[in-house]
Image (cartoon, rainbow, N blue to C red):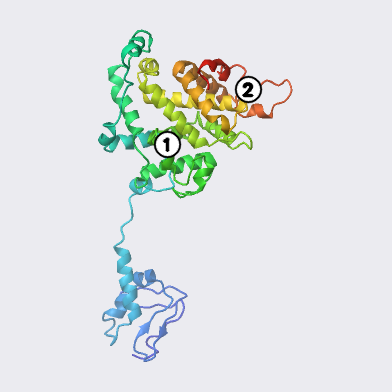
Amino acid sequence: MNEKSCSFHSKEEFRDGQGERMSAGYSPSYDNDKSVLAFRGIPISELKNHGILQALTTEANEWEPRVVSTEVVRAQEEWEAVDTIQPETGSQANSEQPGQLISFSEALQHLQTVDLSSFKKRIQPTIRRTGLAALRHYLFGPPKLHQGLWEERDLVLTIAQCGLDSQDPVHGRVLQTIYKKLTGSKFDCALHGDHWEDLGFQGANPATDLRGAGFLALLHLLYLVMDSKTLLMAQEIFRLSRHHIQQFPFCLMSVNITHIAIQALREECLSRECNRQQKVIPVVNSFYAATFLHLAHVWRTQRKTISDSSFVLKDLEVLAKKSPRRLLKTLELYLARVSKGQASLLGAQKCCGPEAPPFKDLTFTGRSDLQPHSS
């Protein structure tokens, strides 16, 4: 085969017996013995489309090459490998993307599908009372939870027994969602690192701060940031927690409030409201948010600092168990005013002179109302 018979020019035809055309702009090069045609700089797709690979590896116009170029063989193998790649299906691939936010309901549904039987064995649904305490609770205490709600109550308490599983992608998405919603970041972060201390965890691993509340503590934070009605409240409390004087560990404080909610549920303090709504999980969520709101208001208005945290939490627990309906009503009024742009936790800090604070129409209980129970 001579050089003239194999010569191609830009925009000229290359015929391999099938009448295919070579795209413009590619020119072949020859190896040293002039016997093998090596196409350098031509995409594999171009070789495939125009039958050039077949022309070089099979008879074409009664010409059979003595040696098959290694470049041609490698190109054909790569192309065949590309043909075997199967595209991923849409929904399943997207659902496992680490950057995707997760809602409270989606996380809860996941927990309802996994085996939690080993954790359920640990729960004590109600407080055991004996003697005079049992008689007093029977005569003057709150009503018992309706039997039809026991399963939902037990699920809440079971989740509180679960820890953070770093191997579960849903647990990771819950953490990522909390981080992104509070910080406004658009990017994922490591599940361990100093950035969690910025959110108010004590260390680089959030799992170590969930004692007493378990994964329920993270679910409550997720509810707070993913519910459009409470997101603004969560962001304002987070800003308050970063105040240069009144700062406090936001997530750690939230874990303590979740623990208060667990105790209130076990002591049947929420039974009346659960029976009224015929639900448990929404009532516990709202009670958690209402208790957090009250803590933030007391913290800001009474100029609390981190040294006051244990006293504030103790008083808060007494109030929350004694008057859960009062806290829930306060939350309801606050959210109604927020939706109209009339309430802000931190707005009053910028006020001066006779200007009224945004909470003037809301009833909050401070330490002065709980002096007999305070340390």
Residue carrying label 2: 358
Taking the image as shown, residue 365 lies to the left or right of residue 178, namely: right
Q: Secondary structure at mark 1?
A: helix
Quarter holding residue 22: bottom left
Q: Crowding at label 1, few (<14), some or many (≥20) Cα neighbours within 10 Å?
A: many
**Residue located 29% across and 83% down the image:** 61
Classify 40 as above or below 285. Answer: below
Classify 248 as above or below 37. Answer: above
Q: Give amino acid for label 2.
A: Pro
Cα–Cα gap, marks 1 and 2: 29 Å
Q: Crowding at label 2, few (<14), some or many (≥20) Cα neighbours within 10 Å?
A: some
Q: Give amino acid for label 1.
A: Leu
Q: Which mark is residue 218?
A: 1
Quarter holding residue 241: top right
Taking the image as shown, residue 169 lies to the left or right of residue 253, namely: left
**Residue located 46% across and 50% down the image:** 190
Asked whether the viewer can see residue 20, the reply is yes
